[in-house]
Amino acid sequence: MPNPPSPRAPAPPAEIQRRAQATWDAFCDDLKQAGRQLIRDDLPLGELDAAEGLRYLSRLVRTGLERHVEAVDPADPHLHSLCDERIKGFGGDNPDSRYFGATISGDHVYRLRGDFRSCVHVSLMTNGFDAQGAWRVTGSLDSNTVPEARERPVEIEIGGAGSGAAERLRLATTSETKSLLVRCTFAGLAAKQSLELELTRADASGEPVRVAFEPIAEGLLATAKFVRSTAETWTNQSVALRRSFNQLPLQDPERIRKAGGDPSVFYYSAAWSVAEDEFLVIRLSPIPDCTAWGLQLNNLWTESLDYTQAPIHLNKASACYDPDGGVTIVVSERDPGRPNWLRTMGHRSGTANLRLMGAKAPVEAEVRVVSRMEEIGADGR
């Protein structure tokens, strides 16, 4: 009886296989480093904070993959949501806003079709990095520069030359441009459902865009770096804010602009702390004429609390105003029986943001902790 054939030795992995495995291993190893934010000596965590921290890191992974892998090719633009009612954004995502991003390039021309009529404020930015690696804005438009957006759906050219009347409906790009950021702010949550956006390439040839190894591999590594650096950046800010609880200072406008903030907005940030049987009272001076304003509660990871479950934010349309035009806000776990109540959702501490859009002057904020509602006068003081 003939001997059975000897089993064939498995073929050695091809070079591309080794590179793929090495990329995945590097992605996983780098991703692990983000978990160091959960064991910081300067940020003690309770069980709720730790649970939200794990969820926060997983949400950053989702955002990073969407940005750097799914939407990595500027030749095949994909306008993706950066956060929504369930997947929160980092850095104090505004419950009154929707945020969208896309990878684009100054080598292509794009068209953004949108119906912004339900928005009270719109901000469009193209962004990139200069030769020194510093982040910079390469083009911007907003509600003031595109008044047509308040009256009808519009089509905005991104890149290209533009000419004549169309120049006002053109969002500039440069050779440094890498991304598009769209911010849309609404007076109420229901208005969000009316927003319609579509991003396409105006100079597409019609040929399908093929998936390539290098952009996907680089995108995975960029995702891990994004998760690690973003978690570190915003956790550092939360820790810094916690050095002075229960204050609401105006942030440096130039620093905010360099970090990608809307230049037409005054930003305020705070760390808050209130015991279960106490009330945190935020008194805003008379609100100046503005496009919109809003104040929200966040957890210590700078995510807005769940505004689908409880009142955790207030805005220009929903606030009850004091006789002098100011606003008195009460932050607590239990209902104080007063207007402008924001619920802490089981948190004893967290962060908060106040935005004032389109105002010529900022507001002043006074924050104090009281044990009884009777300590607040009828005028909020």
Image (tube, grey):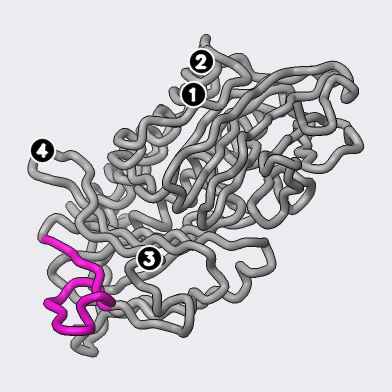
Label 4 vs 2, first from the N-terminus: 2
- Name, please, the residue furthest toward the front: 324
Label 4 SS: loop
Residue at the disc numbered 4: 132
Q: Distance between the residues labelled 4 and 2?
A: 31 Å
Amino acid found under the numbered disc labelled 4: Gln
Which three-letter amino acid code belongs to the residue tagged 3? Asn
Q: Which of 287 and 95 is in front in this view?
A: 287
Mark 2 → mark 1, Cα distance in angstroms: 6 Å
Residue 214 locus on image (x, y percent): 20, 57
Q: What element carries label 1?
A: helix
Q: Marks 3 and 2, how far apart in space?
A: 44 Å
Name the residue located 53 percent from the left edge and 60 percent from the top edge.
Answer: 185
Q: Is residue 78 visible?
A: yes
- Residue drawn 73% across and 35% down? 328
* Marking on residue 40: 2
Q: Position of residue 121 (x, y in %)?
A: 48, 62
Magenta-tinted stretch: 157-174
Q: Do the residues labelled 2 and 1 touch (CB within 8 Å)?
A: yes
Residue 37, numbered label: 1
Q: Distance between the residues labelled 4 and 3?
A: 32 Å
Q: Residues within 10 Å of mark 4 (few under 14, many from 20)?
A: few
User: What residue do we see at 42% from left, 31% from top?
Assistant: 251
| SS state under label 2 | loop
Specify the amino acid type for callout 2: Arg
Relative to the observer, which residue lies in front, 264 or 9?
264
Q: Which of marks 1 and 4 is nearer the N terminus?
A: 1
Q: Is residue 10 left or right of residue 328?
A: left
Gap between marks 3 and 1 measured at Cα = 40 Å
Q: Name the residue under label 3.
A: 144
- The mark that comes first in sequence, 3 or 1, is 1
